[in-house]
Amino acid sequence: MGINTPPLWLQSENSNLVAEIALRIRRSLDLNEILNSAVQEVRELLETDRVVIYRFLPDWSGEVSVESVGDDWRPIIHEIIHDTCFMNGWDKPYRQGHVSAIEDIQNCDIHPCYVELLESLQVRANFVVPILQRPESPGEEEHLWGLLIAHHCRGPRHWHSTEVDILTQLATQLAIAIRQAEMHQQLQEELTQRQRAQAELIRANDKIMRLNDRLKTENLRLSAELDITRQLQEMILPTPEELKLIPDLDIATYMKPAAEVGGDYYDILQHKGRVKIGIGDVTGHGLESGMLMMMVQTAVRTLLTHDEKDAVKFLKTVNRTIYDNVERMKSEKNLTLMLLDYCRNLLEISGQHEQAIVVRSGPSPRAEILDTIDLGFPVGLEPEIGQFINKIHVKLHPGDVVVLFTDGITEAENTQGMQYGLDRLCEGIVRHHDRSAEAIKDAIVTDVYNHIGRQRIFDDITLIVLKQK
């Protein structure tokens, strides 16, 4: 085809051309199929030598993702192209929807660096249309996903205005098809992850239930059952060595069950730069409460391993798992559960439990009490609790202290029936806030036992002290 010879389709009317090609491109939800179909359709439409889709890399070099090329010309698919023009800001016109149509690279006003690049690719005439995706939120700019590029290699070529209009419309349709394919792929990946997480939860739950059935079937003595469960509880608690590996937090913990097996739960897990902290209190004590505590630990760890970051989905899944197990066990147990996500000095808190206490560092420290009553709902009591789950964020500064506890501390009674209380707990934290997490923990625990004296301990005692380094 010579410089002034238009494609045959330009010599006849075809108002449905764009719709027909767009329909063929969008038949699939597979991104690779969409892109390959697009370059093939455009090359046949333009009767040109090469059509490619060019994807930008973070340094504004780029890769030829897909290509349709004639037999007489060198394939360039998957080549990394270092276009210094783009690196110097020449991408801005494309972000604004600019279309570039060059009839002859040897007889036009373009930068020498661009001429040299095109000559290395055997290009004589060049046509570039940006693939722009609409912003997901108001106020954002359109995203320059890539470029749809036609190369005419055999000689100069005049790009007709109708060709420009058609390819601009096709680029818009292609951007929509790409967005749909990417969303479909994302949904498929999320579905696969959730199915895997669900399978892991089912296997974990079945394992725990088999253990419970085995204990009952073998009619072991009650003391032996309690001892086994207590040992299992202790085995899955975070070790001091694990806590020391968390770089930004100084952490100290304490747990003392009131009976052989307690119903308190806590865990601190580090995963991909984030820290998941959980604390809860199962109703009652004994074997069932201890089993429920281990079910919660298993569910939390499984969801964390599968990168579930959404607080609402996380708690909803834990709740449904515990609810189904409680129903199967024909038990009336439930628990309070607060989950904290820590990353880079920021805490995200969700779930209903006792208050969290924050003491800021400085010459005049004071206790901030964070009520969690509106952040969730008792776990295992109802099948669906998503509508009750909320979250708050707390920014931590060096020296700030966060204390988590179960009601075994605040409701601990002395021989006169007086409770230890939240105020006394806050006073102790403020008094010792400038010390290490271990020292703060030791001071509080000592004060609680001094208050209890000779009185019997009626509830499990659990304490977590976090201090921002």
Image (cartoon, rainbow, N blue to C red):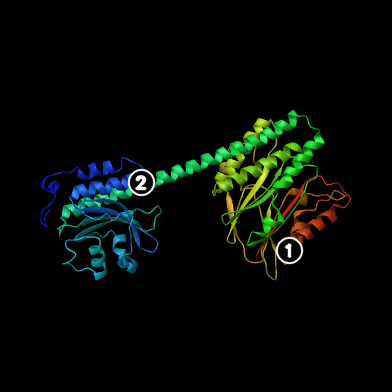
The residue lying at 75 percent from left, 37 percent from top is: 287
Which of pointers 1 and 2 lies earlier in the amino acid sequence? 2
Residue that label 2 marks: 31
Hey, which quadrant is residue 95 in on the image?
A: bottom left
The residue lying at 89 percent from left, 50 percent from top is: 454
Location of the C terminus by quadrant is bottom right
Question: Is 247 on the left-hand or right-hand side of 165?
Answer: right
Residue that label 1 marks: 430
> Does 335 appear above or below 240?
above
- Residue type (three-letter) at the residue carrying disc 1: Val
Question: Is 349 on the left-hand or right-hand side of 187?
Answer: right
**Callout in the foreground (1, 2):** 2
Task: Tell me residue 117's x, y (percent).
Answer: 26, 65
Task: Tell me residue 425's x, y (percent).
Answer: 76, 57
- Residue type (three-letter) at the residue carrying disc 2: Leu
Specify few, some or many for label 2: CA neighbours under 10 Å numbering under 14, 14-19, or 20 or more. some
The answer to whether residue 285 is visible is no
Task: Tell me residue 215's x, y (percent).
Answer: 74, 32
The residue lying at 28 percent from left, 44 percent from top is: 25
> Could you say whether the residue bearing mark 1 is in a helix, strand or loop?
helix
Task: Tell me residue 199's x, y (percent).
Answer: 56, 38
